[in-house]
Image: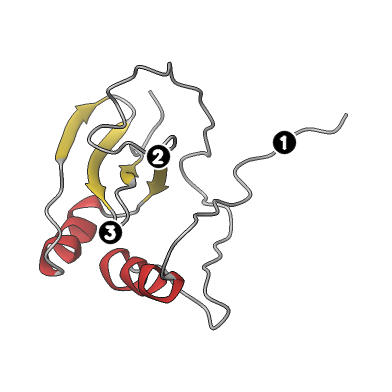
Amino acid sequence: MAKVLGLGGLFIRAEDTEALSAWYGRVLGFPVADWGGARWPHPDKGYTLWSAFKADTKYFAPSTSPFMINLIVDDLDGILERVRAEGVEPLGQEDQDPYGRFAWLMDPQGLKIELWQPPATEP
């Protein structure tokens, strides 16, 4: 039986695609290729999740975008150090969640990004 195996991509409209790609490369370390995007093999830890949220959710705030992206990271502290060095202040951080460690930031277009470091073992 055919089934979806995980997130196949995320496509974002941008007024300045080169500047946005450069921001993701500089601030989050995306391996931006010559064609302007990034590609990764499926992670060996964590998982890809799709979930619908109620229209009045405050979870995406302060973004007004109809979506948010979650990025699996291997070292949340290291990523946050890089983010701050680029002048981007995270919106918050959660280190006590049984599903792992989380932090949030906004990209230059107002899209909220959730960074997720999965726990060593699943809860």
Tell me the amino acid under the disc marked 1. Answer: Val
Q: Earlier in the sequence, mark 2 or mark 1?
A: 1
Q: Nearer the viewer, mark 2 or mark 3?
A: 3
- Judging by the rendered image, the residue that carries numbered circle 1 is 4
- The residue positioned 18% from the left and 33% from the top of the image is 94
- The residue positioned 51% from the left and 39% from the top of the image is 47
Relative placement, left or right, of 86 versus 24 is: left
- Judging by the rendered image, the residue that carries numbered circle 2 is 68
- The residue positioned 53% from the left and 39% from the top of the image is 48
Relative placement, left or right, of 7 versus 72 is: right
- For residue 88, which quarter of the picture? bottom left
Q: Secondary structure at mark 3?
A: loop
Tell me the amino acid under the disc marked 2. Answer: Met
Q: Secondary structure at mark 1?
A: loop
Position of residue 106 measured from the top left corner of the image (x, y, whole percent): 25, 49
Q: Nearer the viewer, mark 3 or mark 1?
A: 3
- For residue 31, which quarter of the picture? bottom left
- The residue positioned 32% from the left and 46% from the top of the image is 113
- Judging by the rendered image, the residue that carries numbered circle 3 is 108
Along the line of sight, the residue nearer the viewer: 63 or 35:
63
Q: How far apart are the two marked residues, 3 and 1, measured between alpha carbons?
A: 31 Å
Position of residue 122 measured from the top left corner of the image (x, y, whole percent): 41, 29
| Within-10-Å neighbours for mark 2: few <14, some 14–19, many 20+ | some
Of all residues shown, which one is farthest toward the front?
A: 15
